[in-house]
Image (cartoon, helix red, strand yellow):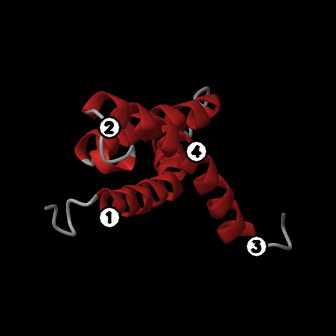
Amino acid sequence: MADAHSAPGFQRLVAVVLLLGAGILSLPVAALALDGEGTENLILPAQLVGMAVVGAVVGYLLPGLAGASASKRRSAWVGVAVGLLLALVGVVVLFLLLNGLEGA
């Protein structure tokens, strides 16, 4: 019998929370590294590539993200998709935190 820490539901929750935090922080980190003359257009693609990699790693390490019977490979690909989705959510959350609803 699986304990609470290896249950797919718990792994899914941990993975989503980790990826949401990474999605919110990934844009400022990418901007910090690439904000310069000639590289400002690379900020968003770098953020998305970074979140795809982070999502793949989180999905591989927490296979419950893709379901109880999913393989490590499928879990990694589900992690990539969830990572990219939460990167976009992170951009919206960061925008709202910086500008508020009045600036939107």
* Residue 69 percent location from the top left of the image: 30, 41
* Residue 80 percent location from the top left of the image: 45, 35
Q: Amino acid at mark 3?
A: Gly
Q: Quickly name the residue at label 3.
A: 100
| CA–CA distance in space, label 1 to label 2 | 15 Å
Q: Amino acid at mark 2?
A: Ala
| CA–CA distance in space, label 1 to label 3 | 32 Å
Residue located 46% across and 49% down the image: 29
In which quarter of the view is residue 63 placed? top left
Q: Quickly name the residue at label 1.
A: 10
| CA–CA distance in space, label 4 to label 2 | 20 Å
Q: Which label's residue is closer to the chain start, 1 or 2?
A: 1
Q: Which label's residue is closer to the chain start, 4 or 2?
A: 2
Q: Callout 2: helix, strand or loop?
A: loop
Q: Quickly name the residue at label 4.
A: 85
| CA–CA distance in space, label 3 to label 2 | 40 Å
Query: Furthest-front residue in view?
Result: 1
> Going by the image, does 69 lie left or right of 31?
left
Q: Nearer the viewer, residue 103 or 77?
A: 77
Q: Amino acid at mark 4?
A: Leu
Q: Which label's residue is closer to the chain start, 1 or 3?
A: 1
Up-down: is 68 above or below 42? below
